[in-house]
Amino acid sequence: MKKIVFYLLALVLTVSCNELTEFYTSEYKYSYTRPIGLMMSKAFDTLNLSGKGIKIGVIDAGFGKFKTNEFTKNLNIVAYRDFVDEDTTNFFSSRENDHGTIVTKSIGGKNSQNQVYGLAFGSKYYLAKTDIYDKEPIEDEKRLIKAIDWLISQDVKLINISLGYTTFDDDDSYSNKDLNGKTALSSKHIDSILNANKDIIIVVSAGNEGNKKWKHITFPSDVKDVITVGSTDFDGIKRFKSSGTGVDYVNYIKPEIATYPIPIGNSNTTPVITGLIACILEKQNLNRDLIKEIVIESSSNYNSPNKEIGYGVPKTSLILAKIKKYR
């Protein structure tokens, strides 16, 4: 089952164009899209954080048009690698799938008019193509594992994965009864890495299976120590219908965080949170456990978490207040 939560889903929704293109401008230095606007406070905006100096790894399906997109063309790309065919000749070509470009735009996209899709426009980017977009071989999951290892070898501590796996075209060994964070190849690998490295933060999409037969989150977003991100409705209150839900047979909440997706799909909520975390790390260098604690405790649904939107939408005003404790 195809796992990339892509922005073309927006075409079949009844959401108006005005809602999809709305920028928050009142009182702020920058113009933010709605997902950031739901989180943003005046105090956070005035800090001019941009994830400066933070290394971010993006594992995705393709980075076509990256160098021509007005929101991504000026980002600092340090390294990139194609794990599908090990040839980077056309890595940014217009012929390549651009899912990774759209995702990175939501991590750190900013144009010359100071319109901001992603908060981490001052970060250093490491891009990895691992996925064959129009097929679903189990090799996709194996390439994801290789990409994670490569990023760690580059001393990347913050990784965005807007991919997720359920079943494969050539392998049916997984079911949603395996969403325990330790069964799928990618989940087991990530769980081992995070147990050994408290400074590595991996942010993963909850998947887009919420209104499908699978229903729940996807691999590897089931790993306990990753930050799993789902989607909310327009106002950030309830689960967007396609967003994957957590399962009842684990003792932790998934997804932990959620926000409204622009474009529609969990692929584009995950990077918004990655960009936010890059800014937090710029402000205060904290380990993963503290980052998770701060983000979760600063979220709108903290007092009544559920398996739909987790702890809810982070609020930057509360994040700043909690960061002060660790100075």
Image (spheres, rainbow, N blue to C red):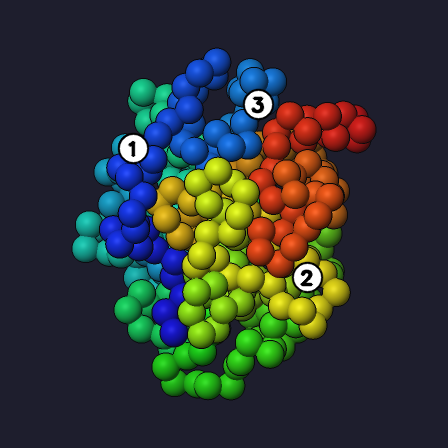
Element marked by disc 2: loop
Image coordinates of residue 279 in percent, x first then y, are 58, 32
- Residue 280 shown left or right of residue 62 in the figure: right
Exactly how many numbered labels are in the figure?
A: 3
* Residue 144 makes an appearance in the image: no
- Residue 240 shown left or right of residue 157 in the figure: left
**Disc 3 versus disc 1: nearer the observer:** 1
Q: In the image, is residue 241 above or below residue 40? A: below
**Disc 1 versus disc 2: nearer the observer:** 1
Q: In the image, is residue 166 above or below residue 327? A: below
Rendered residue at 64%/64% (across/down)? 223
Inspect the image, locate mark 1, and give the three-letter code of the amino acid beneath it. Asn
Q: CA distance from mark 3 to mark 1?
A: 22 Å
The reply to whether callout 2 and callout 3 are in contact (CB within 8 Å) is: no
Image coordinates of residue 182 in percent, x first then y, are 66, 73
Kindly identify which residue carries mark 1: 18
Kindly identify which residue carries mark 3: 41
Q: Residues within 10 Å of mark 1 (few under 14, many from 20)?
A: few
**Depth check: 246 or 53 in front?**
246
Q: Quadrant of residue 181?
A: bottom right
Rendered residue at 70%/43% (across/down)? 302
Inspect the image, locate mark 2, and give the three-letter code of the amino acid beneath it. Lys
Label ID, residue 224: 2
The reply to whether callout 1 and callout 2 are in contact (CB within 8 Å) is: no
Rendered residue at 39%/58% (across/down)? 5
Element marked by disc 3: loop
Image coordinates of residue 150 in percent, x first then y, are 52, 59
Inspect the image, locate mark 3, and give the three-letter code of the amino acid beneath it. Ser
- Residue 77 shown left or right of residue 272 in the figure: left
